[in-house]
Image: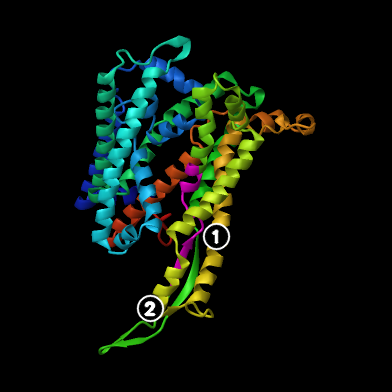
C-alpha cells in the first residue's frame, strides 16, 4: 500500500504527467456533465418505462456503451458506438479493398488518412442513427399509449439529428484529445467512465439486500461469497488478459556497410485473448435482435415473441448460441487482424527465424497452429466470464427443456442453480472485461511514464503488461 501511495505522489510530482492526468480527468468530467443535458422535446418518464420493459434488447447494449445516456436520451445518447462501429467497418474493409490495405502499411501518414475516413463515417452513421431514433420515438408509444414526443414533426426530427450527431462528434473529439494530450486511450476511457459511474447503484442494491435479508438467514454468507466471487473473477481476468505465449525468434547476422546487424535473440508475443472484447460484443448484438424485433412486432406476429422468449437470458438455447457465436467471432476477428503468412515473410526478409522451424511457409503454419490453440482458449475464457454474471442474475433454465428432461432437472437441481441468485449484478460479462482491460491499459501507461523518468512504478516485480 505504501508503494502505491508513493507512486501516486510521484505521478503528481512530475509536471508533464500531472498535467496529462488532470487534463484527462477534466475532459471526462465534461463528458459526465453532458449526461445531465436532455435532448429537447422528449417525455423522459415514458422513455424510462420503455427501457424497463426492453431489457436484453439492442437498446440495452447501446445504453451500456453510452454510459446510461441512451436510456435518458441526453445529448450524448449515441455515445461512442458510431465511432466503434466505424472503426470496425474500416478494419474489416482493409481486407477487401487494396487501397485501404496500402494505407495501413504506409505508416503514420496512412493511419492519419484512415482516422480521417473513420471520422467521416462516424458522422454519417450518427446522422442515420439519430434519424432512426427520431422517427421511432414519434411513432412508438409507451405504457398506457402515452406519446414519447411532446411536439412530433419535421422540427423535432431535425432538432434530434442535430443534437445527437453533434454530441457524438463532440465525444469523438474528447476521446481523440485524451489519447493525444492525456493518459490512456480516450475512447476506451469514455466507455470505462460510463460503466463505472453506475457502481454506486450496485453497492446500494447490495446494501438494501443485506438490510432486508433478501436471502433469509443465509444473507450474510451469500454477500461474503458474492464479494469473494467478484474479486476472484476480476483477478482471473487480470491474469488471463496479461497472459502471453512467447515464441522465440533468432535473427541472423548481416553485414551492412561496415556494421554487423542482427545476431540477437527476441520473441514473438501472442496474447491468449487476441480478440479482446469484440467477440462478446458481436455475439450480444446478434442475440439482442430477436428481443428488439419482439418489442416492435411482437403484438402483430406472435411467433416473433416466441423466438424472443426462447432466446432470453438464462434459456438453454440462448446459452448454447451465445457460446457458439463467441467461438466463431473470436476465430473470425483474429483471422482478420493477424496474418501469419505476412508475419513469416517479414521475418524472413529481416533474417529472422524460429529455432527448429524452416522460414517461410513452415513458419506461417507453425504460428497459425499456436494461434488457433490460443484463440480457442481465449474464446472459452470469454464465454465463462460473460456467462457467470448472467447465471448470477437469471440462472440456467434447464427446467424449461422439453421431452421430460426439464422436469428431471427441476427435481434434482436446487432452485438457485436454475433460477439464479436474483442479484442485480451491475457489471455484466462484457462490461467487466472492458472495465478491467481499460484499467490495466491505463495503469500500464502510467507505469511506463514513471519508469521512464526513473521513478518507481506501481508494480513490485517486473512490469505490468498491457492487454493489447
Q: Using residue 102 as the reference point, say whether residue 464 is left or right of it.
A: right
Q: Where on the picture, by quarter, is residue 456?
A: bottom left
Q: Using residue 419 as the reference point, say whether residue 242 is left or right of it.
A: left
How much space separates mark 1 and mark 2, taking CA atoms?
Answer: 26 Å
Viewer-nearest residue: 177 or 1:
177
Q: Is residue 4 magenta?
A: no
Q: Is residue 265 visible in this depiction of the protein?
A: no
Disc number for residue 374: 1
Residue 15 % position (x, y): 19, 51
- For disc 2, the marked residue is 349
Mark 1, other Cα within 10 Å: few <14 / some 14–19 / many ≥20 = some
- Mark 1 and mark 2 lie on one chain; the one further toward the N terminus is 2
Viewer-nearest residue: 93 or 65:
93
Q: Residue at x 41, y 50 (%)?
A: 440
Secondary element type, mark 2: helix
Quarter holding the C terminus is: bottom left
Residue 88, compared with residue 391, is above or below; it is below
From which residue to which does the magenta span run? 267-282
Residue 303, compared with residue 386, is above or below; it is above
Mark 2, other Cα within 10 Å: few <14 / some 14–19 / many ≥20 = few
Q: Is residue 296 visible in this depiction of the protein?
A: yes
Q: Residue at x 49, y 77 (%)?
A: 354
Q: Where on the picture, by quarter, is residue 166?
A: top left
Residue 53 % position (x, y): 50, 21
Q: Does the magenta stretch include residue 280?
A: yes
Secondary element type, mark 1: helix
Q: Which residue is drawn at 64% across and 37% down?
A: 317
Q: Residue at x 29, y 23 (%)?
A: 157
Amino acid at each position: 500500500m505504501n508503494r502505491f501511495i508513493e507512486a501516486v505522489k510521484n505521478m503528481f510530482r512530475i509536471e508533464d504527467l500531472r498535467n496529462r492526468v488532470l487534463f484527462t480527468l477534466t475532459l471526462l468530467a465534461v463528458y459526465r456533465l453532458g449526461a445531465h443535458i436532455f435532448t429537447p422535446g422528449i417525455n423522459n418518464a415514458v422513455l424510462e418505462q420503455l427501457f424497463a420493459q426492453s431489457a436484453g434488447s439492442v437498446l440495452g447494449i447501446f445504453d451500456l456503451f453510452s454510459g446510461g445516456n441512451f436510456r435518458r436520451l441526453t445529448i450524448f445518447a449515441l455515445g461512442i458506438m458510431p465511432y466503434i462501429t466505424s472503426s470496425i467497418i474500416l478494419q474489416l474493409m482493409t481486407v477487401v479493398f487494396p487501397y485501404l490495405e496500402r494505407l495501413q502499411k504506409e505508416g503514420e501518414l496512412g493511419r492519419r488518412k484512415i482516422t480521417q475516413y473513420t471520422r467521416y463515417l462516424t458522422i454519417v452513421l450518427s446522422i442515420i442513427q439519430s434519424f432512426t431514433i427520431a422517427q421511432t420515438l414519434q411513432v412508438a408509444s409507451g405504457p398506457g399509449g402515452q406519446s414519447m414526443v411532446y411536439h412530433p414533426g419535421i422540427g423535432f426530427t431535425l432538432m434530434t439529428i442535430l443534437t445527437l450527431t453533434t454530441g457524438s462528434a463532440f465525444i469523438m473529439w474528447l476521446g481523440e484529445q485524451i489519447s493525444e494530450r492525456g493518459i490512456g486511450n480516450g475512447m476506451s476511457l469514455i466507455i470505462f467512465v460510463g460503466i463505472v459511474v453506475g457502481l454506486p447503484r450496485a453497492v446500494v442494491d447490495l446494501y438494501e439486500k443485506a438490510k432486508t435479508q433478501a436471502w433469509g438467514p443465509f444473507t450474510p454468507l451469500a454477500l461474503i461469497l458474492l464479494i469473494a466471487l467478484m474479486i476472484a473473477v476480476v483477478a482471473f481476468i487480470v491474469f488471463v488478459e496479461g497472459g502471453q505465449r512467447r515464441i522465440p525468434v533468432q535473427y541472423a547476422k548481416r553485414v551492412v556497410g561496415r556494421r554487423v546487424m542482427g545476431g540477437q535473440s527476441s520473441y514473438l508475443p501472442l496474447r491468449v485473448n487476441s480478440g479482446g472484447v469484440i467477440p462478446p460484443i458481436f455475439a450480444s448484438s446478434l442475440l439482442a435482435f430477436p428481443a428488439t424485433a419482439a418489442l416492435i412486432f411482437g403484438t402483430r406476429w406472435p411467433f416473433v415473441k416466441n423466438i424472443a422468449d426462447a432466446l432470453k437470458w438464462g434459456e438453454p438455447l440462448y446459452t448454447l448460441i451465445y457460446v457458439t457465436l463467441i467461438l466463431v467471432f473470436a476465430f473470425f476477428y483474429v483471422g482478420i487482424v493477424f496474418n501469419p503468412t505476412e508475419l513469416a515473410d517479414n521475418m524472413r526478409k529481416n533474417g529472422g527465424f524460429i529455432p527448429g522451424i524452416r522460414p517461410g511457409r513452415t513458419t506461417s503454419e507453425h504460428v497459425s497452429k499456436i494461434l488457433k490453440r490460443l484463440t480457442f482458449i481465449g474464446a472459452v475464457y470469454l464465454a465463462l466470464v460473460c456467462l457467470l454474471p448472467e447465471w448470477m442474475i437469471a440462472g440456467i433454465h434447464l427446467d424449461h427443456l422439453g421431452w421430460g428432461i426439464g422436469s428431471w432437472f427441476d427435481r434434482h437441481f436446487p432452485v438457485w442453480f436454475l433460477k439464479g441468485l436474483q442479484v442485480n449484478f451491475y457489471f455484466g460479462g462484457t462490461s467487466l472485461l472492458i472495465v478491467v482491460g481499460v484499467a490495466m491499459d491505463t495503469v500500464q501507461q502510467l507505469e511506463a511514464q514513471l519508469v521512464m523518468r526513473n521513478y518507481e512504478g506501481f508494480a513490485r516485480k517486473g512490469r505490468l503488461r498491457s492487454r493489447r
